[in-house]
Amino acid sequence: MNHWIMGAATGDWTRLIAMLDPAVTFHVPVDGFAGVRHGAADAVRFFDWLTATVRADLVVHATLTGESGTAFEVRVTGAMAGEPFTQRLCLVFETRDGLVTGFREYLAWPGGLR
């Protein structure tokens, strides 16, 4: 989660990308990335989109753990496409052998609040 926080703040996702399993699967509620996506190359394309579009500060409010992964409830405040926004989201990570094998993002306020 620390690498996600740093990536959102700086646009540098290299540390998180280095942790992705080559066969990572992910689901994010973002136009252009509909459905379940597969592979690190597609995840890099998503992080490139974030780099070009979002700068935000993330604050973790809760951490939930279970057999299949760890979830973080997060408050996001920043800019998307140059416009200020605030939203809540939940990020879920699945890991194995120190690599992220899957991640999912659920928005509480799609599109953010202005």
Image (spheres, grey):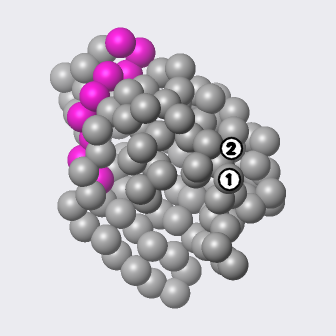
Task: Tell me which corner region of the image, top left, top right, bottom left or bottom right, holds residue 1.
Answer: bottom left
Q: Of the residues shown, which amino acid type is indicated by label 2?
A: Ala
Residue 78 pos. (x, y %): 28, 28
In three-dimensional space, the C-alpha distance between marks 2 and 1, rounded to whole angstroms, equals 11 Å
Q: What main secondary structure does the magenta stretch of the protein show? A: strand
Magenta-span inclusion, residue 30: no
Residue nearest the viewer, comparing 72 with 37: 72
Residue shown at 29% from the left, 53% from the top? 74
Which residues are drawn in magenta?
74-82
Q: Is residue 67 left or right of residue 100?
A: left
Residue located beneath label 2 in the image? 43
Q: Name the N-terminal-most of marks 2 and 1.
A: 1
Disc on res. 18: 1
For label 1, the crowd category at 10 Å Cα-Cα, with few meaning under 14, some 14 to 19 and many 20 or more, is few
Residue 102 pos. (x, y %): 63, 63
Q: Of the residues shown, which amino acid type is indicated by label 1?
A: Ala
Residue 43 pos. (x, y %): 68, 43
Kind of element beneath mark 2: helix
Outermost residue, bottom direction?
67
Q: Is residue 30 above or below residue 40?
A: above
Magenta-span inclusion, residue 77: yes
Q: Is residue 70 above or below residue 73?
A: below
Residue nearest the viewer, comparing 72 with 110: 72
One can see residue 35 in this view: no
Q: Is residue 28 left or right of residue 73?
A: right
Residue shown at 48% from the left, 21% from the top? 53
Residue shown at 39% from the left, 47% from the top? 5
Outermost residue, top direction?
82
One can see residue 63 in this view: yes
Task: Tell me which corner region of the image, top left, top right, bottom left or bottom right, holds residue 60.
Answer: bottom left
